[in-house]
Structure formats: C-alpha cells, structure tokens
C-alpha cells in the first residue's frame, strides 16, 4: 500500500506541439491535449511526461529555454496549463515536466545580459574563458553539428561553454545564484501542481579541469540539495534523471535514496534491439546482471524509443557498428551517435517484434515509458533533419492532417507521415480503436496486465537459463507474487526445456489470454513458441 506511485506506473511521453492542435495554427496546444485526455485514460497510462513547454526560439525543440516561468504562447497560457494538470489529476493521471538546468537558450535574458561583459550581474551565470583550451577532456555530444564545446562571443570578447548546441550556453553551477534560481523554478512549477521533473542533461552541470566534466561529485551534491528542498515542501513529487551513462556511473544518481527517485536505464535499451536481432538473450542478461541493486525507494525508467535518436553512446565500438549495420542501413538514418528512427520502422513494421519488445519492456525491472505514436506503430520521416523525423503530428484519424489540426496542410509544423506503409489513412487511432486486434488494443491489454501485478514494477529479478539461448526466461517476485516471463527472441518457432524444479507445484496462468498451463513438476518444463512469441505467467 505504501508503494511509491512511480514504481508501479506506466509513463507516456509526449510533445505538446505534436499531439493535438485545437486552435488550428498547425501546432499542438494544451487545449488540444485536454481534449485528448480521454484517449490517454483509455490507454491506461498513469503519468504524462511533457517535453519542454517553455517560451523558446525552438532551435532545439524547446530544450533551448528562454523563460523558465511561463508557457510557450504557441501552446497556450499558464491558465491552460493549470487546467490541463487539474483535469489530468481528476482522472488519476500525474504530470511531470522538463527541468532543463544545464543550459539556457542564448536568447534567454540572462545570457543577453551576461554577454555584455564582466560588469554585468549575470556574467557569472555562464561559463567563460579566454581560450578554447580549457576542459579538453570533455567530449562533444552533438557531433553532427558542433566542432567544439566553446564558442566565441564577440560582444564580450570571450568564449562561452556549451555541452550541446552552440546556441545553448551552459549555466555556471559554481555560482550560488544559479543554484538558488533552479530551486525557485522548481518551486514555481510544483506549486502549480506538477508532479515532478525529468531532469535534462544531468551529468554535465559542473566543469572541472582534468576530468571529462561528467558525473562530478559537485553535481551529485547539488542534486542532493535539490532533492532535500523538494522533500521538505512537496510530498510524492519526483525527479527522473536523464543521465546517459554506463551502469557504474548511473547508479550513483540514486545515491542512498537521497538523489533521484528514478533514472532511465539507458544501457539496456539498445541491447533489447540487439537481442532480437542476434536472437540471443546475452545482451540483455549481461547488462541487467551488471546493474547493481538500487535503493528500495528508487526505480528505473525503461524505454524503447523517445524523442531523440536511438542513442548508441552506451555501446562498445563493435556493438555500435553492429547496430548501425542492422538498424541504419541508409546513412540518412544515422544521427549524432545514434539512429533517428521510430520503433515500427526500426523493426520493419513487424508486429510480432513490436509486441515482443513491449512485453520485455514491461517485464524487466523498471517503469516503462512509452513514446507517443509508438502505441499505434507510427512511422517516421528520416528526411526532416536533426531528430524531427520522430516528432511528426500524432495520427488520430484518416481525415485532414490525420485529425491533428484543421489548418492548411502547408501550415503544419511538420508534415504528417504519408509513406505507403505508414500512411496516416491506415495507421491512426480511430482505425485501431475499432479493431480488436490492433496494436493499440494490444497495448491497452498489456498496460492493464502490468498494472494489475505490482511485482512487474518492484519485484526482484532472476533469470532462468535453458539450453536454447534464443529464449530469455525471468522471474519477478514480490510479497509472494511470482511472475514468470519467457520470451522467444527468434524470428522462428522455438522450444525450451526450462529447469524450474524449485517452482515445482506452481501452476502458470498466462496473463494476456488467461490460459491455465499444466503444473510445473520435477522434470524440465517444456514451452513452445511461435516466432517472437512470449508468455507472461502468474504462478499460483
Ligand atoms: C536532452 C534532450 C535532447 C536535447 C538535449 C539538450 O538530451 O533529450 O532532446 O537536445 O538534452 O537539451
């Protein structure tokens, strides 16, 4: 009963701009989002993660914030925001937003002031240098666009530091005024009802010479300070870390339960794609076994895709080459250190693979995060540049602009998907609503199953090994609830003899279809699978 809400939830990530346009200007807005709450409720999700909603020049889709205290006028007003949060809450749906702390837009008034020179009271809010030689060990993240992490500022005759685009100067966290301002921002939105934040680009807050300027102790100390500030005034609100790091560097963001409540499991994500391609459980099992135990109050956030490229940063060189060779045959599909494609096109629109991947996502430890549109198998447009190909308008029906907006099609912020295979006339919510066998209705069932059994969210994890490496079997266990989940990673029919002796006497009940299987005995338990088939069993 005292389980923190985020341990047994399903999160839905969406971009307001892309979801539903109510005022007909070609961009989604809060009024549109309010009108689509029925849909989100019908999907069964518990929490909406909103991509940046702040005023912004929009050169990094809102991650270039120009004002932390209001709403992008294209999306509506603060009043609309408040109404949206109230209406979501009334349905038992929580809402988390983005906290972009590491940098601002160069258009932010702080930076406009700062660049006037050292006399400006805001100068010290950013990181300046007379030479571009400092912090040479820090890697460049947006390798497709940036050559250096320093950019020359004409007006003050110095270089400023930026880990992302050169129009996103990094804030100086050594300045106590910056740290205090972050708390003010957090307070402002929590007071308006937000249930927490996905904290953007966490590892890079501080810089120190002689380090790679990631995961520094100073960063951890500040996060603990921020967490204590939230805990002191707000109950049940969360911080979710975007730290794209290896397990050893990721786990410290939970600290002893006094930093982040949640962190994305970046390392496991590409390995789910590797496993189904190699038809071998190795990649997933190895990385899960490398993840240390995390504090009881903490939780992983797991995902298949999001608004960015499918990042391959947490891969070895060989793994990355492999991923490119199988998932990015066309060079246009590559973006930075990753692949700019949506889930369905990544797996060649193979419905069985889409279902298998989601079933694994829901069965592995952590809270699953779905990316808008993937629940209906939306396609992408790799020709839109940067990561925009996975950010096209949500496809609601087969009408004008896929039901997203009544504007003239030329006015849309991005064209809807019209490829033969993924055309919005076929791939849309209305059509899938009416089809009991659609992907959407599969997803609704999966969400329902997942939420019914808390062991999925917070149970222990143990793998069972059959001789057949194409099969992955795992047991989730909590408070006497036992869930046995078995997956066929192969694109062919398979069988496995699982040694389940210690579970002898248990009767497996399949959760998606309700079928009761023969009791487990002392002999190896035989399971057969169709291509990419899987079972989610509750053991009685
Ligand atoms: C995060 C966001 C990404 C953004 C970057 C810079 O990685 O997910 O979309 O471009 O931060 O803010």
Image: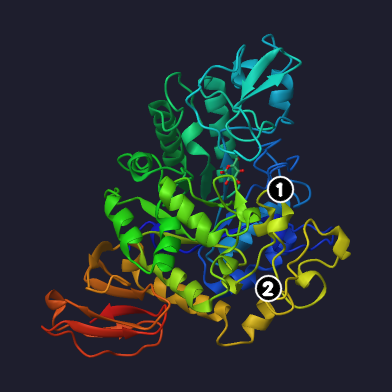
Q: Quadrant of residue 36?
A: bottom right
Q: How is the image coloured?
A: rainbow
**Residue 162 position (above or below residue 122):** below
Of the 4 image quadrants, the one containing the C terminus is: bottom left
Q: Ligand 1, what quadrant?
A: top right
What residue do we see at 63% from left, 63% from top? 87
Badge 2: few (under 14), some or many (20 or more) residues near its Cα, within 10 Å? Answer: some
Residue under pointer 2? 422
User: Ligand 1 within 8 A of label 1's CB?
Assistant: no
- In the picture, measured across the screen, residue 514 lies left or right of residue 468, that is right
Residue 119 is situated, as x and y percent measured from the top left of the image, at 69, 9
Task: Pick whichever, 518 or 382, lies toward us.
Answer: 382
Looking at the image, the residue that sits furthest to the top is 119
Q: Quadrant of residue 1?
A: bottom left
What residue do we see at 64% from left, 86% from top? 434
Task: Pick whichever, 314 or 331, lies toward us.
Answer: 331
Task: Pick whichever, 168 or 333, lies toward us.
Answer: 333
- In the picture, measured across the screen, residue 248 lies left or right of residue 57, that is left
Residue 361 visible in rendering: no
Residue under pointer 1? 78
**Residue 185 position (above or below residue 21):** above
What residue do we see at 76% from left, 40% from top? 57
Closest to the camera, between mark 1 and mark 2, is: 2
Badge 1: few (under 14), some or many (20 or more) residues near its Cα, within 10 Å? Answer: some
Residue 474 visible in rendering: yes
**Residue 514 position (above or below residue 36):** below
Q: CA distance from mark 1 to mark 2?
A: 36 Å
> Of helix, strand and loop, which one carries label 2?
loop
> Of helix, strand and loop, which one carries label 1?
helix
- In the picture, measured across the screen, residue 290 lies left or right of residue 405, that is left
């Amino acid at each position: 009963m005292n389980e923190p809400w985020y341990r047994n939830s399903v999160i839905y990530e969406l971009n307001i701009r892309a979801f539903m346009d109510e005022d007909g200007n070609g961009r989604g807005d809060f009024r549109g989002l309010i009108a689509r709450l029925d849909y989100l409720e019908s999907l069964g999700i518990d929490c909406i993660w909103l991509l940046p909603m702040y005023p912004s020049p929009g050169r990094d889709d809102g991650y270039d914030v120009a004002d932390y205290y209001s709403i992008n006028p294209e999306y509506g007003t603060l009043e609309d925001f408040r109404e949206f949060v109230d209406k979501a809450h009334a349905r038992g749906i929580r809402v988390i937003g983005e906290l972009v702390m590491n940098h601002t837009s160069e258009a932010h008034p702080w930076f406009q002031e700062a660049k006037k020179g050292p006399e400006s009271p805001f100068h010290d809010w950013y990181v300046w240098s007379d030479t571009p030689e400092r912090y040479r060990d820090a890697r460049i993240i947006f390798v497709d666009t940036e050559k250096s992490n320093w950019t020359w500022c004409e007006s003050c005759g110095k270089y400023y530091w930026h880990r992302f685009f050169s129009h996103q100067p990094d804030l100086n966290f050594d300045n106590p005024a910056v740290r205090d301002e972050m708390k003010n921002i957090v307070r402002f939105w929590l007071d308006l009802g937000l249930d927490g934040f996905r904290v953007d680009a966490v590892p890079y807050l501080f810089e120190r010479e002689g380090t790679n300027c990631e995961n520094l102790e100073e960063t951890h100390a500040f996060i603990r300070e921020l967490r204590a500030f939230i805990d002191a005034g707000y109950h049940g609100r969360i911080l979710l870390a975007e730290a794209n790091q290896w397990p050893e560097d990721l786990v410290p963001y939970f600290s002893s339960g006094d930093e982040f409540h949640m962190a994305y499991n970046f390392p496991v994500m590409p390995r789910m794609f590797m496993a189904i391609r190699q038809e071998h459980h190795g990649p997933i099992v190895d990385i899960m076994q490398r993840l240390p135990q995390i504090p009881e109050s903490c939780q992983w956030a797991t995902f298949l895709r999001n608004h960015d490229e499918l990042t391959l940063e947490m891969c070895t060189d060989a793994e990355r080459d492999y991923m490119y060779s199988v998932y990015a045959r066309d060079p246009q599909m590559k973006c930075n250190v990753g692949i700019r494609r949506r889930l369905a096109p990544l797996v060649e629109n193979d419905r069985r693979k889409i279902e298998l991947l989601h079933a694994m996502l829901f069965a592995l430890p952590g809270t699953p995060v779905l990316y808008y549109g993937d629940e209906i198998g939306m396609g992408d447009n790799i020709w839109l540049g940067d990561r925009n190909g996975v950010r096209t308008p949500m496809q609601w029906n087969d009408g004008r602009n896929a039901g997203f907006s009544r504007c003239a099609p030329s006015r849309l912020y991005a064209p809807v998907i019209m490829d033969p295979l993924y055309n919005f006339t076929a791939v849309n919510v209305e059509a899938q609503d009416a089809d009991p066998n659609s992907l959407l209705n599969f997803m609704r069932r999966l969400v329902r199953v997942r939420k019914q059994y808390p062991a999925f969210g917070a149970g222990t994890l143990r793998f069972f090994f059959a001789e057949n490496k194409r099969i992955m079997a795992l047991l989730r266990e909590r408070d006497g609830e036992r869930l046995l989940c078995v997956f066929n990673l192969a694109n062919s029919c398979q069988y496995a003899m699982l040694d389940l002796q210690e579970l002898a006497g248990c009767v497996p009940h399949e959760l998606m279809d309700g079928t009761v299987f023969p009791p487990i005995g002392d002999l190896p338990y035989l399971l057969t699978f169709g291509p990419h088939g899987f079972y989610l069993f509750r053991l009685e």
